[in-house]
Image (cartoon, rainbow, N blue to C red):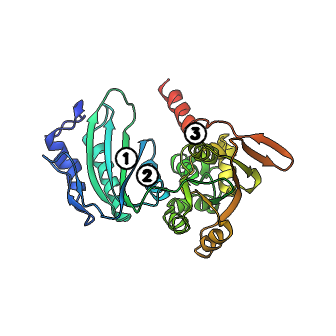
C-alpha cells in the first residue's frame, strides 16, 4: 500500500522503480549505460574529434510550463556553445507535502519533453526536503561540440534573433490564464501561447556556428542581463540601439498588465549572435523563417552604452529577473 506523503530524504527503492525509472526508457545510441537501480551514473560514448559540453538550470515548478522552459534553457545554452544535446539529467527536490503521484507526474513530463526532442533521460536524483515549499527540478543537459566556443572581438556586430520576453509571456499565459481571459480576446492569447513553439534556438545556433560567431542564449534577467553577461565575459564594451530590440505586442500588453519590465524578464528563444558578417547571417536566418536584426556593435573599451534617439545611458549590472520576483511576491502573499 502506498503512503499518502513522501518520506523525507532520498526516494526509496520501490518509489524509484514505480514512479521514476519506468518513465526513463533507453534513448539515443550514444548512451551506452542507462540510469537504473544499482547504477550511479550514465555512460556516454565520446566522439574523437569533439568535446563534452554541459549546461544546467534549476527550475521551481510553480506552473505547468516551467519544466518545458527549463529544459529549453539548458538546450539553448548548449546550442550557444555550438553543441548538439544528447540528454538531460535531473535532480528533483520535493517538499514534505508532496505525494508519490507528484513525483511520477514530474518524471513522466520530463520523459515526454525529452522524447519530443529526441533526447535521452540520463538519470538523476530524487529527495524530499523541508528546505523547499515547491518542487524543484535541477536540470543538466549534456552534449557534444567540435571545440571551444568562439569569443567575440571588438568591432563585431550584435545580432538578436526573434523577440525578447517570449518565454516569460508563455509562462504568464499558462499560470494566469483565468485573469488574462477576462481582459484579452481568444485570438490575442492564442498568439501569446504560440510563442512556446519558438523557444528553441537550435536553427539560429547552427547558422551562427557556421560563420564562426560568438553566441549567447537569453534566459533569466532578459536581454539586458544577456548583453551585460556576454560583454563582461569577453571583457568588451558595446553600443546598442534600444529601439532596435524586437518585442511582440502580446508581450508588451501582458507585461503592462502585470507591471513587469519585459527587457528584464526571462527570454529563452531569443539569441545573441556576435559576428563579423551580420548582414549575411541575418539574410540566411530570415530565409529560414527566423527573424533577426542588428542591435549594435562591440567596443574595445568596457563602456556598455545604450542609445535611444538622442538619449544615452550606460547599462547597469543585471537586475533580478522580473518574472521570478513577481512569482516570489505572489507566493509570499499566498503563504501569509
Kindly state the secondary structure of the residue where label 2 is placed: helix
SS of the residue at dot 3? loop
Q: Residue at x 37, y 38 (%)?
A: 135
At 60% from the left edge and 68% from the top edge, which residue is drawn? 290
Q: Is residue 61 visible?
A: no
Q: Nearer the viewer, residue 134 or 233?
A: 233
Rendered location of residue 237, percent (x, y): 68, 45
Q: Residue at x 61, y 49 (%)?
A: 180
Q: Is residue 144 above or below residue 330?
A: below
The residue lying toward the viewer, choosing from 305 and 324, is 305
* Residue ranking furthest to the right: 310
Foreground residue, 235 or 187? 235
Task: Please tell me which of labels 1 and 2 falls first in the chain.
Answer: 2
Q: Quadrant of the N terminus?
A: top left
The residue to which callout 3 is attached is 321
Pointer 2 residue: 74
Query: Residue 197 placed where, x, y %?
Result: 51, 63
Q: Residues within 10 Å of mark 2 (few under 14, many from 20)?
A: many
Between the residue at mark 2 and the residue at mark 3, the CA separation in whole angstroms equals 17 Å
Left or right placement of residue 336 versus residue 33 in this view: right
Depth check, front residue: 264 or 156: 156
Q: Are marks 1 and 2 in contact (CB under 8 Å)?
A: yes
Q: Earlier in the sequence, mark 1 or mark 3?
A: 1
Q: Secondary structure at mark 1?
A: strand
Q: Spatial distance from mark 1 to mark 2, Cα to Cα?
A: 7 Å
Instruction: Point out the frontmost of discs 2 and 3.
Output: 2
Q: In the rendered image, which residue does mark 1 sit on?
A: 139
Q: Where is residue 46, by image quadrant?
A: bottom left
Amino acid at each position: 500500500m502506498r503512503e499518502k506523503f513522501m518520506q523525507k530524504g532520498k526516494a526509496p527503492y520501490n518509489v524509484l522503480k514505480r514512479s521514476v525509472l519506468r518513465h526513463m526508457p533507453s534513448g539515443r545510441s550514444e548512451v551506452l549505460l542507462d540510469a537504473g537501480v544499482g547504477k550511479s551514473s550514465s555512460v556516454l560514448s565520446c566522439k574523437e574529434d569533439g568535446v563534452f559540453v554541459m549546461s544546467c538550470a534549476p527550475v521551481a515548478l510553480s506552473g505547468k510550463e516551467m519544466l518545458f522552459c527549463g529544459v529549453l534553457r539548458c538546450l539553448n545554452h548548449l546550442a550557444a556553445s555550438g553543441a548538439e544535446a544528447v540528454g538531460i539529467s535531473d535532480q528533483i527536490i520535493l517538499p514534505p507535502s508532496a505525494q508519490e503521484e507528484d513525483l511520477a507526474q514530474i518524471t513522466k513530463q520530463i520523459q515526454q519533453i525529452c522524447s519530443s526532442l529526441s533526447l535521452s533521460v540520463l538519470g538523476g536524483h530524487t529527495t524530499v526536503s523541508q528546505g523547499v515549499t515547491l518542487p524543484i527540478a535541477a536540470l543538466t543537459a549534456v552534449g557534444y561540440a567540435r571545440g571551444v566556443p568562439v569569443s567575440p572581438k571588438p568591432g563585431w556586430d550584435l545580432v538578436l534573433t526573434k523577440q525578447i520576453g517570449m518565454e516569460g509571456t508563455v509562462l504568464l499565459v499558462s499560470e494566469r490564464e483565468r485573469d488574462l481571459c477576462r481582459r484579452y480576446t481568444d485570438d490575442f492569447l492564442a498568439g501569446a501561447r504560440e510563442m512556446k513553439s519558438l523557444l528553441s534556438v537550435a536553427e539560429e545556433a547552427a547558422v551562427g556556428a557556421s560563420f564562426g560567431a560568438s553566441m549567447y542564449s537569453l534566459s533569466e534577467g532578459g536581454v539586458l542581463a544577456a548583453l551585460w553577461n556576454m560583454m563582461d565575459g569577453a571583457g568588451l564594451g558595446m553600443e546598442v540601439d534600444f529601439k532596435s530590440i524586437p518585442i511582440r505586442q502580446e508581450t508588451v500588453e501582458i507585461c503592462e498588465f502585470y507591471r513587469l519590465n519585459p527587457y528584464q524578464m526571462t527570454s529563452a528563444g531569443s539569441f545573441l549572435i556576435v559576428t563579423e558578417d551580420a548582414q549575411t547571417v541575418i539574410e540566411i536566418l530570415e530565409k529560414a523563417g527566423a527573424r533577426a536584426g542588428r542591435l549594435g556593435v562591440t567596443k574595445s573599451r568596457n563602456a556598455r552604452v545604450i542609445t535611444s534617439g538622442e538619449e544615452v545611458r550606460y547599462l547597469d549590472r543585471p537586475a533580478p529577473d522580473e518574472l521570478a520576483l513577481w512569482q516570489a511576491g505572489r507566493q509570499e502573499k499566498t503563504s501569509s
